[in-house]
Image: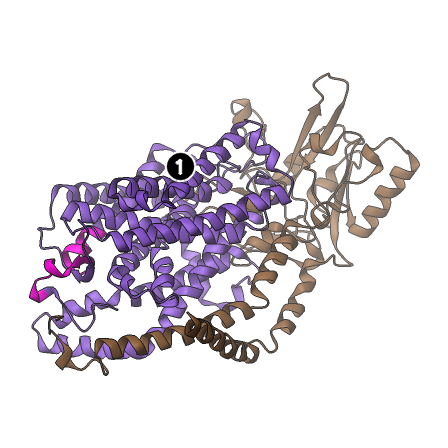
Chain colours: A purple, B brown
Amino acid sequence: MTEHWERCIRLKEPLKTKPFLIFAGIAGLGLLLGLYRELTGLGYVTGLNDGYSWGLFKNWNVTALTALGSGGYAVAVIAWIFNEKRFHPIMRTAVLTSLLGYGTGMLALGFDVGRPWNFVWLADPRTWNHYSVLWEVAVCMTSYFLLALDVENMPPFLEKMYRSGNSKKKERAMKVFNFMQKTFPFGIALAFVLPSMHQSSLGSLMYLAGPRVHPLWQTPLLPLLYLLMAYILGFSCVLLVLALSAYAWNLGWDAEILGRLAQVMSWTTLIWLVVRFADLVHRGVFGLAFTFDKFSVYFLVETTLVLVPTVMLLSKTQREAPGSLFRWTFLVALGGLLYRFTPTTLAFSPLGDYRYFPSAFEILMSIGFTALAVAVFLYAVKTFAILPASQGKIAAEEALRPFDTL
Amino acid sequence: MDANRREILKALIGGSAVAAVATTGMPLATQAKSDKFELQPDALGLMYDATKCIGCRACMPACQNANGLKADVGGSGGLYMQPDTLNARTKNLIKLYVAPDGHERSFMKQQCMHCVDPACVSGCPMEALHKEPHGVVGWDPKLCIGCRYCQVACPFNIPKFEWDAVNPKIVKCELCRHIVGTSATEPACTKVCPTHAVIYGKRSDLLAEARRRIKERPGFYFEDRVYGETEAGGTQCLVLSHVDYSNLGLPKLGKESPAAETRKVSDFVYRGFLTPVVVYGGIVAIVRNRWKDHLKHEGHSGGSESHGEEKRA
């Protein structure tokens, strides 16, 4: 039974449900551990060492999970550049997942760096190393978070102010909104250019490591492959979040939007696969995929996880059944995350006898950051009109204008 | 679709005009800075000839003393200095390689190679790792954020991190730059070396000396070549040994530095920041039309309040 999502609604549910409390608890624990980490050295609490000096925080929470947080960027391309207007009702969910993906990624980065107080020097352009890919990622991600994502997530917040009943607040909300109306295209364009830059640069980061990354992954095309994967993971994240929300809160199932999302995702994945295989063949390392050492196994698992669901999702019947749509998308996301993670850790070989496995402390912190994202998501959808719903589900008070399709 | 294509084309043309203005002068800026990636004529370095090294390790405590490092006594149960790898307390380490069949052995002095175009300097976001005069790769504690990208990037796995410190430092050989020229004339390790297995000087002189030794005894040194002459774009510390260099922890590396290769990819994509500016201009133009259309469609005219709460028909 398909419905059409048209507007955004606020969930009228008490905030403090059991799942919320569990996620908030894990998040709280993670942050407490993070505080403890700041008071000791990284070596005491993590499995990091001089060979594998980047671990879960950077390689998983930043490199892999911010790709999952590229939903706002990826869906905006369909909605604004390719002008598919029916995607506007899901934009709020998309930009919220991006805010949370990037926010928690940057939080993880803050706990990961050893001398965070020296970040103040970023304010002095004389210290910038323009040739550093990491500098570009740091500046570009921060700008995206502060200049684009914040602004994109503003409408639900303004709307709440507008409807607060306080005339002063209402006036202020209108003022901000009027300003936003004039500057909106500039913001959207920024929200396209900045992620294009840093999502590809996350790939260039590992290119500098040269021969230390296994040839099945090391290629000058890393930036392109990382960028394409950011699109794929962005689509998959929005799709999965919407599907889970629709199931959890009975929002109805807009097969048209979700199916189209999966379709665009599988086309993007096909392009990614073509680039990936062409590159392997061109560099003459394709044979390494079948040596059945551990790298070959990582490669085969990762590729199968991406390839098989993509082929399945090309079929309309698979996209139309909610169950199979969810399962295949989930598997693509898994394979995609593995691809983004592997060059940084699994396929990274420093010289010498080093091993890395994250410590329990590190894993708890890493999970804590993700739990924080989920907890804030639950708070947001119960406080602001974010999740999409069909006309029938929208009570008068929630059919909000003028901000709702921003 | 046709209208779309025209729009995008128009936008791109508009965008490139903006970009052309914005990027005038940018190639100049790039050029002015690029000499820091090249070999400086007065570059200083070391030359370590493993065939002369007797493995006395005198250079190790000398290095500790000169750099104020506490000896790593972990490997000996607290009795004497015995690090097994370079670490936050060890910038210089003499290792012994013995071939599995026992017929071939060589010492190796492990330390920063002071690359001509170092990956660590290229990767460091804050210029904490930088090239000092004479091409020495130095570290500045005031700027380092502790991101450890230098450790990920270095092809020789040299920079070390103080994992147990709250205010951790990056530790690596800086060629005794804090004493050479003031209280000393050469680094501590070369000064104490009894057999002159490691010598200090201008890279050009060291390279000439290395070539002379190779010429003197053809077939003696591995492949009759000096490691560091071309590896990863060249290093200012050079190594000679009769053993395959890759057995000594010196990886096989191409003639181009990873830093230069990465810059090539970035330059190809960014074109001196032209690409992002053009794309930005293009997207603004496209979205602006969409946005105007959207506002018209939604019946907004500057967001006046009368449109506030009506329900969609």
In this rendering, the answer to whether A77 lies above or below B195 is: below
In this rendering, the answer to whether B42 lies above or below A371 is: below
Report helix, strand or loop for mark 1. loop
Q: Where, quadrant-wise, is the N terminus of chain B in this rendering?
A: bottom left
Whether residue A403 appears in this view of the structure is: yes
Front residue of A230 and B127: A230
Q: Residue at x 85, y 36 (%)?
A: B224
* Residue A387 is inside the magenta segment: yes
Q: Is residue B81 left or right of residue A309?
A: right
**Quick one: label 1, few (<14), some, or many (20+) residues within 10 Å?**
many
The x and y percentages for residue A226 are 48, 50
The x and y percentages for residue B55 are 72, 28
In this rendering, the answer to whether A380 lies above or below A58 is: below
Front residue of B32 and B5: B5
Furthest-top residue in view? B101
Q: Which residues are magenta?
A: A377-397
Front residue of B164 and B179: B164
Q: Which residue is mark 1?
A: A46
**Where is residue B164, by image quadrant?**
top left
Q: Residue at x 37, y 36 (%)?
A: A45
Q: Residue at x 29, y 45 (%)?
A: A370
Q: Is residue A379 left or right of residue B289?
A: left
Q: Amino acid at mark 1?
A: Thr
